[in-house]
Amino acid sequence: MCSLDGQLKQWRMNYDDIVSCWKQPLSSVLMKWTPHCMDHHPSSNEFLIGGPESCLLYSSVRLDVPLREWSWGQEPVHNAKFNPVEHNIACALTKDNSLMLIDCRQDQPVRKVKMDLKLNAFSWNPMEPFIFTAASEDYNVYTFDNRFFKFPRRVHRGHVNAVLDVDYSPTGREFIRLWKCDSTESFDVYHTRRMKRVLVVKVTLDAKFVLSSSSDQNVRLWKAHANEIIGPIQPRQKASLQTCESLREKFKDHPEVRKILKHRHLPKTIHASSKEHAIIRAKERRKERNTRIFNKNDLPFIPDKEKHVVAQYK
C-alpha cells in the first residue's frame, strides 16, 4: 500500500493477522517521492510502482531498493499494470501522452508510442494477453496489440467527453461503454437522471454486472446485458429467448432491424454533442476529399487509427 505521504507499507492479509494486528504493518519504508500508482504481480511477490520520473519494480521481501527501474525521459508514470496472463509483460502510461511497453526481464523498455492527448487508464484483455485497451482525453478508446505496437488496432467511438476509465469483462468480449471487442461503435449505454461524472467502472467476475462510481457519491450496479433475465427461467421461456436471439442475429444487417437494435435513448446534452461530433468528422472527411480532388500533388491516405499517433520510439 502506498500513500501521499510517501510511505510504502506492507500488511499480512491472513484473517487472524487482520483481526489481531491490523494496526501494525509488517514493514514500512519512507520513499523520497509520492507514488502515483501501484499494481501487484499476479503470481509472485513483486509489484510495480509509478513514480515521478520512472516505473519501478519492487519485491515484498526487500522494499528499500527497487529490483529494476524503467524510464524513457523524465516523465511521471500515472498508471502501470502487469499482464494477467503473460506475467513478465507490463504496460505504463506517462504524463507526456505515451504508452510504454515493458518486459520485466529487461533493463530497458521495449517500445514507446506517443499519442495526441493524454491517456487516462487502460485494461488488459483477460482472454487475449497481447491485447489491451486505453482510454484517452480525445473522447476515444484505443485497442492496441503489443505484437504490433506502432498504431492502435482499433478506435472505439461514442463518448462526447474525456474517457476516464476502461475495463474488460472476464470473458474478454465486452468492455465499458459497452462495446464488442471487434466493433468501433458501442452497443449499449447506461445513464440516469442524477448520475454525474463517472470516475471508475469495473466488470464483475461473472461478467453479468457492471459497477460504476460517480462524483455524486454513489456506486451503481448495472446489468451487463440490459435485456438479460436474472433468476430461474422456465424451459419454454428459455427456448423463446433463444429463438428471438437467433432471429436478431440472422436479420441484424437488415436496415430496419439494424435501426431498431442500435437505437438508444440518450440525455439531451449527450445527443446534441454526438450530432455535433458527427458533423465535425463529416466536415473533416469532406475537406480531405476535396483537397485530394483539387490538389495536383497526391496526398497520402492516413487511416484514422494512425492519425492520433504522434511518435514512436524503440
Image (cartoon, grey):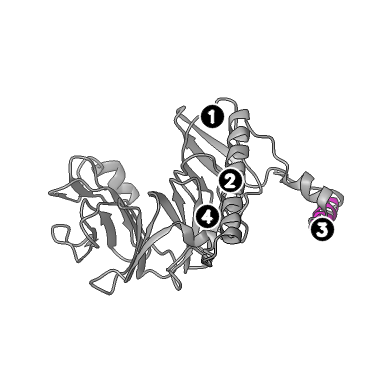
Residue visible at 30% across and 42% down in the picture: 19
Q: Are marks 4 and 3 in contact (CB under 8 Å)?
A: no
**Pointer 4 local density, CA inside 10 Å: few below 14, some 14–19, many at least 20:** many
Residue visible at 51% across and 60% down in the picture: 305
Q: Could one spot residue 79 in this view of the protein?
A: yes
Q: CA–CA distance between discs 4 and 3?
A: 25 Å
**Pointer 2 local density, CA inside 10 Å: few below 14, some 14–19, many at least 20:** many
Instruction: Say which amino acid is labelled 1.
Output: Met
Residue visible at 76% across and 47% down in the picture: 261
Q: CA–CA distance between discs 1 and 2?
A: 18 Å
Residue underneath mark 1: 195
Residue underneath mark 4: 168
Q: Are marks 2 and 4 in contact (CB under 8 Å)?
A: no
- Along the polypeptide, which appears first: circle 4 or circle 3? 4
Secondary structure mainly formed by the magenta segment: helix
Relative image position of residue 97 (x, y in whole percent) = 35, 53
Q: CA–CA distance between discs 3 and 2?
A: 27 Å
Residue underneath mark 2: 158
Instruction: Say which amino acid is labelled 3.
Output: Ser
Q: Is residue 232 above or below residue 127?
A: above
In depth, the one of 245 and 76 nearer the eye is 76
Q: Are marks 3 and 1 in contact (CB under 8 Å)?
A: no
Q: As drawn, is 102 to the left or to the right of 263?
A: left
- Along the polypeptide, which appears first: circle 1 or circle 2? 2
Residue underneath mark 3: 246
Q: As drawn, is 227 to the left or to the right of 158?
A: right
The residue positioned farthest toward the top in the image shown: 194
Instruction: Say which amino acid is labelled 4.
Output: Tyr
